[in-house]
Amino acid sequence: MAAEGKFITCDGNEAAAEIAFKTNEVVAIYPITPASPMGEWSDAWAAMGKKNLDGIVPKVIELQSEGGAAGTVHGALQAGALSTTFTASQGLLLMIPNMFKIAGELTPTVFHVAARTIATHALSIFGDHSDVMTVRSCGWAMLAATSVQEAHDFALISQIATLRSRVPFVHFFDGFRTSHEVNKIERIPDDVIRALWPMDDVAAHRQRALDPDRPVLRGSAQNPDIFFQAREAANPFYLATPDIVQDAMDRFAGLTGRQYRAFDYYGAPDAERVVVLMGSGAGAAYEAIDALNRAGERVGMIIVRLYRPFDADRFMATLPATTRAIAVLDRTKEPGAAGEPLYQDVAATLYRHWPIVNSQAALPRVIHGRYGLSSKEFTPAMVARILDELQESSPKPEFTIGIVDDVTNLSLSYDADRVSESDQVTRAVFYGLGSDGTVGATKNSAKIIGENTPLHVQGYFVYDSKKSGAITVSHLRFSPQPIQSTYLIQKANFVACHQFQFVDRLDMLELATPGATFLLNSPFSADEVWQQFPVAMQQQLIEKKLKLYVVDAAKVASDAGLAGRINTVMQTCFFALSGILPRDEAIEHIKTAIRKTYSKRGEAVVERNFAAVDGALAALVEVPLPANVVETVQAAVSPIPETTDDFINRITKLLIAGKGELLPVSAMPVDGTFPTGTAQFEKRSIAAEIPIWDPSICIDCGLCSFVCPHAAIRMKLRPSDAAPNGAPESFRDKDWSGKDFAGAKLTIQVAPDDCTGCGVCVDVCPARSKTVAKHKAINMESKWDHLDAERANFEYFLNIPEMPRDQVKADVVKATQLLQPLFEFSGACAGCGETPYLKLLTQLFGDRTMVANATGCSSIYGGNLPTTPWTTNKDGRGPAWANSLFEDNAEFGLGMRLAVEERQYLAIHLLGQLSEQLGEMLVQDVLNARCSNDQEIIEQRARIVTLRERLAKVDSPLARQLEPLVDALVPRSVWIVGGDGWAYDIGFGGLDHVLASGNNVNVLVLDTGVYSNTGGQASKATPRAAAAKFAADGKAARKKDLGMLAVSYGHVYVAQIAMGANPQQTIRAFLEAESYPGPSLLIAYSQCIAHGIDMTTGMTHQKDAVKSGFWPLYRYDPRQARQGGHPFQLDSRKPTIPLKDFVMKEARFAMLARSDAARAQMLLQKAQADINDQFHYYEQMGAIERELCDATAEEV
């Protein structure tokens, strides 16, 4: 009799991780999207003391890379433990060497994989099967889950099967579509797990463990005489595995009532047309097959659950004998192959087995197609179209679906409205920003509905890989019946817009069904809001007879002390309008969820959220719809600037508009090359408040521009005799107070549609009014009060010429800010601590910079479409940027440096051979140019222009060979950029080697002390006593001193900097590092939202970091020793405040003090001792005389 489990509402990651945690003893983890939450759950459970089936708390340990995690699992398995890990994408690929070993040694384990796209021409964090298909030859069994429930169930079935078969398993489910989908599932009770648990096989595994009491040797090196035979010796284990898996599935069904098979068939028993697929696409296929069979067609599908070993006999037994045509669908692409993997398996199976099983029937026609790459939508309408294709007399043998392929013409067109959802399903869509809490609130809403009503619920969340501030769309379904709709909502009963600026940018009401409810967060009252809507939106509201409600959620949140966090207000309004639960009951559940979510941040945060709930409904107002449209007052979002660039007009503008799905294959760059300088066209306009400059108080310090994370505040000078022709009336300037450029006029201008409203500029502004309290030279004010004026001002500002680089001595703050930033308007979080360093880098060296960027936050806000922030000057020059991987960035950058030098050497060699034809004097001038400053570089570029002109007139193969190389005669500044997860952990080995090599590269480490990009997991840069994901009970070890490790070589320039604490030291370090003729390393303190601080005060927080000794400032310049001085310069004073006073301003420290005060106190005492010891050591370093040889890269 089936045991009834408790229903819970969770996502696929939690569902799988719960079983993995209960059935293992050693859990080796490393963060990678979208699999990181599995490790986070395991770490959190271990920190709570949660126990596994054997009554012990599993050891959860974070490694430096996925390769390290796999190696740890391998070792744990060999020593007789039950061990697992979680991963995806490139992380899985890093595990391949160990996977071959684990399988070769017939060692039972399960790797749980949230299947994700492999980076090829571009990185993608989204889901397909390219990663799991890459490991299909490793000798692992592969079990594919199609839903959140199956991710839970198959985690157990695969664990049982691996122990019984000794074949290791990859248990995978689709990244995001399953891993992050919230659904109501039935939890497997512990007594069911125990009843199924193969104790004898666990004992046998332990008996095989390495043990000096019964020593054996594994991992030998074998010769050709026996290796082949040894590989074949494992065959019986693989042959037995399908039966073992099916037996586990059958026994599982007996106890839970949920029956699975290696291949499951769904559809008409006499189907003539069948699709074969695996993964979450089965959900869409269910609905299509039901719709077509109701219409009298005979169709079905086979869901592949056990992909490896591929059991041909079971497949043939599952396929209806009436089948005449089959479409095999692969969620991956394998260029150059005869077909994708699943197709090849099915085709080979039919070729070999059909004549045996169905000797009287003709072999079915088999076609194959690709779908859903990088989480591309896959809908019931697409499945229906594929089944239609099988009816054609000559169907396409190979096809794609969901895109328009106008190059190889493989795509199938389809009617998107052909299959509709059931009327039993209620559908709601919520539009928000990545930082406003919409996604979190919708997840809580799904859990409230799932756990407090009999309804089934599904939540799915669409967001790109940008940081906070990107558009998010949350899809919420609830229904009396289980929900299998693994695709986005196409028709919604409820639409909520949580950010008013979207009304001009997005066609949100396209999804609204007639009579639907539209909830809008609006800064305008019910009387004012209608005329703010675009005419098209007004028409939709009227024609669809929508119910319109508005609430000023920002004001309610601000009044409650939650500025910017509108999620609680909007969630309360949703429950009030949807009627899913009685209003009072809904509010009670919302407050319970608030306490669960925010209690770790303190009671004050909980109470502020309660206040927001209580104030929400009073502010909710219904807006009666007028009979006719009216003229719109103003555009909420600035129109995309005009440009003659064909690529921008054809592609980028569509991407910005969210219409990238419409782009055909022919529009795509074939190799992933995209133009830079496109962020200027995005105009997100996400700030509620923007900084307004008051020139009457300004002291021209430039700090506001210096610290701006998004280059949204700019400084320019113009000569006093250059009249501001055409300047708007609101345009402001003042007399420049500097001695240089005497008589010039200064203007400081905000880009209102590019500003994120972080307020960092106001926080650092030192100029205060003597008459008006809290009034500074720059002040945050409502965007809506200044939007039109500031748009006009900024447009005029852009036409003021940039300062010539050779006229600016950029060695002080205000001088650097007169130079054009070539990193602007990124998608980084508001108040980001990383981006100001990148902006400064481009102001100092940008027009000759090459950047190798490690995967991480900086590669995502720096290189994530639709737009890129790296840009160019008026001459078309700017940073050339590329990303390889996470783990190899230092080596990637070194390769760039070596190529630059080799191109330069070859150019010099060819130039010497052509000296007579080109002119001896010009050649010598080019070869002898110093190029040590901007003036000399500009002069060299002028010589290169002349050189090109002369080269064009030389009819010689050598001249043609030299032409593409001449630009290499202008020095390139090569920068290797990444975060601490790269520099301290996964890429440390490569970084160490590159620094040791002595080559002239510059390394900038943006140190947030966590893996910011994957959600804030601990790295070896995480300070002692800080709580972080993967260190939920506080990090026990001290922070790795990366700078001193580099200093130990003696020939590396090293600086530790914090621009908010000492801007001048930061500038000096950049200039010294770039000028140093060898490897340089800058370690930059970068505040992050993961720290749990008010990001507005991020730069002030940097000052406190230095004052407390948490972040000492220093520079180590080997040149000083060679000149008889001290190479080590300690740039910060002795700590003046206790470490505790600084760290308790951060939630990552404070939350541990609340959850475990004794441990927090113990770790903080050790951390204070670390600080004292480190500063004393640095003081001693400054007094050490050190003699260094003048080593070259070759000598090193």
Image (tube, rainbow, N blue to C red):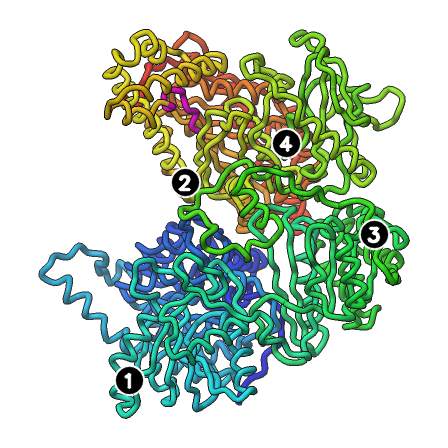
State the separation of the CA atoms marked 4 and 1. 65 Å
The answer to whether residue 1022 shows anywhere in this view is no
Read off the residue under disc 2: 987
In the rendered view, tell whether residue 12 sits above or below residue 721. below
- Residue 511 colored in magenta in the image: no
Indicate which disc, 2 or 4, sits on the residue closer to the N terminus. Answer: 4
Q: Pointers 4 and 1 in contact (CB under 8 A)?
A: no
Q: Earlier in the sequence, mark 4 or mark 1?
A: 1
In this orientation, which residue lies closer to the viewer: 106 or 853?
A: 853
Residue 208 vs 4, above or below: the answer is: above
Query: Would you name the residue on which mark 1 appears?
Result: 354
Q: Residues within 10 Å of mark 1 (few under 14, many from 20)?
A: some
For the point 35% across and 22% down, which residue is it?
966
- Given residues 1041 and 908, the one toward you in this image is 908
Give the side of residue 678 with respect to residue 532, left or right.
Answer: left
Q: CA distance from mark 2 to mark 1?
A: 51 Å
